[in-house]
Image (cartoon, helix red, strand yellow):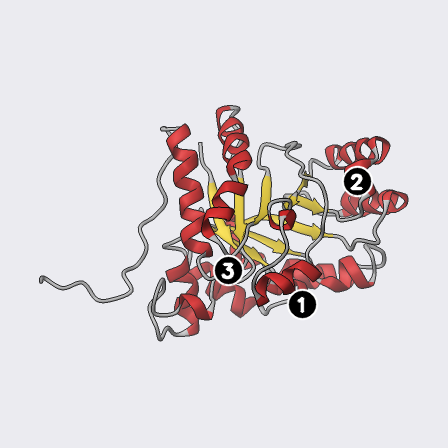
């Protein structure tokens, strides 16, 4: 029984010297982050496929049980829209091979214009992917959340491929208008879709966006504490990523979410202890 938690990145200026030691060499940053969280979103792979050497350094900084949820390159999902993607997909899969079991799932994030009419394309794409990886899909078109026929169609397609459906829950964020620059930026960019908490696989993945205000963030995730605890009791192994607009305290919040779930499910293993920011002394 395991719940993994993480953030949208493993390095952030706001964490330096406060949550993570500073300065840190690039090849040490992920290692220190992995003391706070045991999962991370691979958002950088959306913009560029890393070299095998870079990926090998990620593997060297993490235990085999650490979870990477890696986003497929945008050339695959957004530019070519899952068609004619053999070459970039092959290059991506080759590059991430050094991660081995750390690749928890490959994340197929689709643009908001990807509609129910495009589901056959998704079905063909998923059917051609190697079974050596797990896959999870994030959709943003409103019909997938409001149209029962579209929901059934997508669930059937994902079920046939044993792929997950990643919800990005922004409902707590959009409850009231933004109050900071970071919140105003997120207000313009983040999707507004209803909350969804149906798990299609035994390894559900959730992305949750709170507010810069910690109290608001914690209030907004209470539904997910209940759902996650239920999933664990059902024998599932969820991964939950905690976001806020500025992400300044995201690792702390991710651990707090884990603690709240663990209070409901006492058999849940604890997270690792963070690497001390300052050297330990005797006095």
Q: Please identify, in this view, whether the residue under mark 2 or under mark 1 is nearer the observer.
A: 2
Asked if marks 3 and 1 touch (Cβ < 8 Å), the reply is no
Q: Is residue 79 left or right of residue 97?
A: right
Tell me the quarter of the image containing the N terminus.
top left
Q: Please tell me which residue is depicted at 53% across the width and 48% down the height of the picture.
A: 241
Q: Please tell me which residue is depicted at 29% across the width and 64% down the height of the picture.
A: 277
Q: Which residue is mark 1?
A: 47
Q: Which residue is mark 3?
A: 247
Question: Mark 3, residues whose alpha carbon is within 10 Å: few (<14), some, or many (≥20)?
Answer: many
User: Vertical placement of 200 versus 109: above or below?
Assistant: above
Give the secondary structure at mark 1: helix
The percent coordinates of residue 222 (x first, y second) are 51, 36
The percent coordinates of residue 103 (x first, y second) are 55, 50
For the residue pair 14 and 64, the one nearer the viewer reads as 14
Label 3 vs 1, first from the N-terminus: 1
Q: Which residue is mark 2?
A: 144
Label 2 vs 1, first from the N-terminus: 1
Label 3 vs 2, first from the N-terminus: 2
The percent coordinates of residue 91 (x first, y second) are 69, 64
């Amino acid at each position: 029984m395991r719940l993994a938690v993480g953030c949208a990145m493993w390095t952030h200026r706001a964490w330096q010297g406060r949550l993570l030691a500073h300065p840190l060499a690039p090849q040490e940053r992920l290692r220190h982050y992995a003391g706070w969280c045991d999962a991370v979103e691979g958002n950088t792979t959306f913009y560029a496929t890393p070299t095998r050497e870079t990926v090998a350094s990620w593997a060297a900084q993490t235990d085999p049980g650490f979870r990477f949820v890696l986003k497929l390159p945008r050339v695959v999902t957004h530019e070519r829209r899952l068609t004619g993607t053999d070459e970039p997909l092959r290059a991506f899969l080759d590059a991430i091979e050094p991660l081995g079991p750390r690749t928890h799932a490959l994340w197929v994030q689709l643009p908001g214009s990807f509609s129910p009419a495009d589901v056959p394309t998704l079905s063909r794409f998923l059917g051609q992917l190697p079974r050596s990886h797990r896959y999870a899909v994030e959709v943003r078109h409103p019909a997938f959340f409001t149209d029962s026929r579209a929901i059934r169609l997508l669930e059937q397609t994902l079920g046939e491929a044993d792929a997950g459906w990643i919800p990005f829950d922004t409902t707590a964020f959009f409850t009231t208008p933004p109050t900071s620059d970071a919140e105003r930026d997120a207000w313009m960019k983040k999707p507004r879709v209803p909350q969804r908490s149906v798990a299609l696989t035994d390894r559900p993945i959730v992305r949750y966006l709170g507010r810069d205000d910690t109290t608001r963030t914690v209030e907004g995730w209470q539904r997910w504490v209940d759902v996650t605890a239920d999933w664990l009791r059902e024998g599932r192994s969820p991964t939950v990523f905690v976001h806020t607009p500025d992400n300044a305290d995201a690792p702390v919040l991710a651990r707090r979410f884990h603690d709240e779930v663990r209070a409901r499910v006492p058999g849940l293993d604890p997270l690792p202890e963070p690497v001390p920011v300052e050297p330990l002394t005797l006095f």
